[in-house]
Image: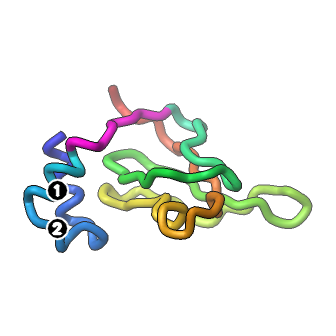
Amino acid sequence: MDHVAVLLRQSPLFAGLEEKEVRRLVDLSQLQRFRSGETIVAQGSVGDSLFLLCEGALQVSAEGEKGRAVALATLDVPGTFFGEVSLVDHGPRSATVQAATKTPR
């Protein structure tokens, strides 16, 4: 999980944290792996966590007109975080995020 600590320190969201705070976040973190096409968070669902991309790529989409998914972004830079808005506003997820590549074991 030292890789996670490095990514946290490089992230603008966590850059101001002290070392003990980074270690605490690492201790609270759960490493998850996803298959290509697997949904990580679904638009409209309740969110109680944020995610930090360690490797791979993710597709972000939202429901558009006529219920069709509209691609919003591709996240592929390690250290990119998402899901923080639901932690702040306690509202439903504003977009769906799916794995675009399989993460190695």
Dot 2 corresponds to which residue?
A: 17
Type of amino acid under label 2: Leu
Identify the secondary structure beneath mark 1. Answer: helix
Left or right position of 43 against 84:
right
Q: Is residue 44 magenta?
A: no
Looking at the image, residue 105 lies above or below residue 97: above
Mark nearer the N terminus (1 vs 2)? 2
Along the line of sight, the residue nearer the viewer: 62 or 88? 88
Secondary structure mainly formed by the magenta segment: loop
Query: Where is residue 83 drawn, in percent x and y?
Result: 49, 58
Looking at the image, residue 78 lies above or below residue 104: below
Dot 1 corresponds to which residue?
A: 22
Type of amino acid under label 1: Val
Query: Where is residue 91 drawn, in percent x and y?
Result: 62, 63
Looking at the image, which residue is at 45% across and 51% down?
49
Query: Where is residue 40 drawn, in percent x and y?
Result: 54, 43
Left or right position of 49 against 24:
right
Q: In which quarter of the image is residue 67?
A: bottom right
Q: Over which residues does the magenta segment extend?
A: 27-34
| Dot 2 crowding, Cα within 10 Å, few <14, some 14–19, many 20+ | few
Q: How far apart are marks 1 and 2 (CA)?
A: 6 Å
Tag of residue 44:
none
Query: Where is residue 95 drawn, in percent x and y?
Result: 64, 59
Check the image and name the residue furthest to the top.
105
Q: Quadrant of residue 17?
A: bottom left
Q: Are marks 1 and 2 in contact (CB under 8 Å)?
A: yes
